[in-house]
Amino acid sequence: MKDNDSAIATAGIAVSTPDAHTAGDPGTAKTATAKGPGTPKAAATTPGTPKAATTAPGTHVGRGMLLAALGVAAFSLTFPATAWGLEGMGPWTVVMLRSVLATVPAGAALLALRVRPPERRHWAGIAVVAGGVVLGFPLLTTLALETSTTSHAAVVVGLLPLTTAACSAVRTGARPSRTFWIASLVGAVVVIGFAVQQSGGVPNRSDLLLFAALLVCAAGYTEGGRLARHMPGWQVIGWALVLALPVTVAGAALALSAEPLELTARSVAGVLWLAVGSQFLGMVAWYRGMAAIGISRASQLQLAQPLLTLLWSVLLLGERLPPAAPAAALAVLVCIAVTQRTRG
């Protein structure tokens, strides 16, 4: 059975019931529906069960939008932080260390809260998340940033909302409206035009790596958003990091022995942000936001990510802001406004 692309649904009488997959996360509960006036009172409530909180749909959507936006803000610092990390480490070292370090808080939280492992049916999706957002996207973008500026990489990866929406439509059976797709395509055209203008119209090796990164990341985002309807977002990325740990530990050991290492304040700060901010906390907020407002709608917020990254590139790396950035920013913000007013 295919999942819908929105986690918002209406029910009769919501009754909080414990969820095996949210053990240790008191703020997460499943809801059951009690129907009919003849339903026994004991079936609706049990002793010690807290009353179900009633949240207005608008508040639910607003919270999801805020969480997704916080995830985008965290991701916007990923490329500048990667550039900092590459100042003192090789690309494989940066990628493997960020994942290993991110597993520390994620694994500690899973152990401290005694979270049960996911059901067998969820492990395939978690493997896609691990391959897409724990290993694939970080590795491909880091290799691309060896020869590409962060500003150029940011605008190419600006195509991620469209690829995520398309992947979501295929995977979950979602059918966004025509207006939604038109606004998304316009945003993508703006991003492509900006990228072509910056690169002189000739794609290079870094562009190919970035395009490949788009595909694997879109798959990881789609599966993560789908899984976040069955378990809290922090558990989705937490189990993905744990699943990838044997690969990342072995990779880190090999990379540290083969690549030069020169620890500086900026390189250490960059890797720490990649591990804690981009790889863990940002993913937690992002997956919870996608679960609340739908994968396709949340993905459109990422149209703002390249523009935020351009700003950080200027402030943190001293890169020159491209002259076309203000016009691209205005066009992208208009596309975001249109997509967020359109129901899939």
Image (cartoon, rainbow, N blue to C red):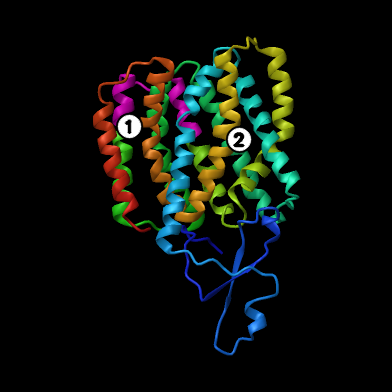
> On residue 322, which mark appears?
none
Say which residue label 1 marks.
192
All told, the count of numbered labels is 2
Q: Secondary structure at mark 2?
A: helix
Task: Name the kind of residue labelled 1 in the image.
Answer: Ile
Q: Which residues are magenta?
A: 192-213
On the rendered structure, is 118 left or right of 201? right
Q: Secondary structure at mark 1?
A: helix
Q: Position of residue 93 (x, y in %)?
A: 64, 20
Q: Position of residue 14 (x, y in %)?
A: 55, 72
Mark 1 or mark 2: which comes first in sequence? 2
Q: Disc 1 versus disc 2: distance between alpha carbons? A: 26 Å
Q: Is residue 211 magenta?
A: yes
On the rendered structure, is 202 left or right of 106? left
**10 Å crowding of disc 1: few (<14), some (14-19), many (20+):** some
Rendering quarter of residue 99 = top right
Task: Name the kind of residue labelled 2 in the image.
Answer: Val
**Residue placed most toward the observer, 267 or 243:** 267
In this view, the residue farthest toward the bottom is: 38
